[in-house]
Amino acid sequence: SQLAMAYYDVRDYDSAHEHFLALSEREPYRLDHMDAFSNVLYVKDQKVALSHLAHRSVTVDKYRPETCIIVGNYYSSKG
């Protein structure tokens, strides 16, 4: 998680994407820092992956602030 966030903070979105993807596969119910992952997906214009992340986040806990950010990024990507 810290490594993914470090790459995100220095705007290395490709490396951040790899680490966030591995993290979400390893811990599918984790929402900590997934809002940053949604920002990476938004910047990389990966709408399908962002849609899956938004759906999973709402399923895990729809009241978490991270979920609100993820869903907001999803709707922003739709135009």
Image: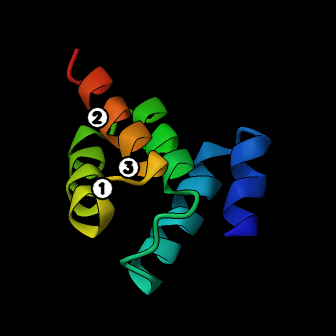
Instruction: Identify the residue at horizontal 23%, vertical 14% (top origin).
Output: 79
* N-terminal label among 3 and 1: 1
Question: x, y percentage for residue 4?
Answer: 67, 61
Name the mark nearer the viewer: 2 or 3. Answer: 3
Instruction: Identify the residue at horizontal 49%, vertical 56% (top origin).
Output: 34
Question: x, y percentage for residue 53?
Answer: 30, 55
Question: x, y percentage for residue 60?
Answer: 29, 69
Q: Secondary structure at mark 3?
A: helix
How are the colours assigned in the image? rainbow
**Tag 1: amino acid:** Leu
Question: x, y percentage for residue 16?
Answer: 62, 55
**Tag 3: amino acid:** Thr
Front position in the image: 65 or 55: 65
**Does 14 sit above or below residue 77?**
below
Instruction: Using the image, tell me which numbered label, if any, was put on residue 53.
Output: 1
Q: CA distance from mark 3 to mark 1?
A: 9 Å
- Neighbour class for label 3 at 10 Å: few (<14), some, many (≥20)? many
Q: Which residue is mark 3?
A: 67
Q: Which residue is outermost to the bottom?
A: 26
- Neighbour class for label 1 at 10 Å: few (<14), some, many (≥20)? many
What is the number of callouts on the image?
Answer: 3
Q: Which residue is mark 2?
A: 74
Q: Secondary structure at mark 2?
A: helix
